[in-house]
Amino acid sequence: MDERGLYRIDVRGRMPSALTAELSRFEIVEVGDSTTLTGLVADSAALYGLLARLEAVGLALVAVQPLHADSTDRGGMT
């Protein structure tokens, strides 16, 4: 069973370059002091791990939104 899900994660703060490279599978958009990550997450454990990683580098979580695979609001993901 495929548990992967497409997520949009909004955080306050800018991504450190090392973390941007580490998360290259995500589309990362920075506007001002906010960052949006959009991409596939393997399962809930991976999602919580990603959120913990973002927090560990000082980014404040604003929102987590699951997206439907056929959603047009995917930040350009295909």
Image: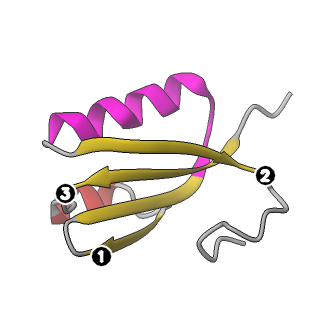
Query: Quadrant location of residue 19?
Result: bottom left
Under mark 2, the amino acid is: His
Judging from the image, what secondary structure is the residue with disc 2 in? loop
Query: Image height check: is 6 above or below 24?
Result: above
Picture coordinates of residue 1 (x, y %)? 86, 27
| 1 or 2: tag closer to the N-terminus | 1
Which residue matches tag 2? 68
- The magenta span reads 40-57
Query: Image height check: is 65 above or below 71?
Result: above
| 3 or 1: tag closer to the N-terminus | 3
Judging from the image, what secondary structure is the residue with disc 3 in? loop
Under mark 1, the amino acid is: Val
> Dot 2, crowdedness within 10 Å: few (<14), some or many (≥20)?
few
Picture coordinates of residue 48 (x, y %)? 44, 26
| 3 or 2: tag closer to the N-terminus | 3
Judging from the image, what secondary structure is the residue with disc 1 in? strand
Which residue matches tag 1? 31
Under mark 3, the amino acid is: Gly
Which residue is found at the position 62% from the left and 37% from the top?
42
For the residues labelled 1 and 2, say whether their Cβ atoms are less than 8 Å apart. Answer: no
Which residue matches tag 3? 13
Q: CA distance from mark 3 to mark 1?
A: 9 Å
Q: Is residue 21 left or right of residue 68?
A: left
Which residue is found at the position 39% from the left and 37% from the top?
50
Q: Nearer the viewer, residue 68 or 1?
A: 68
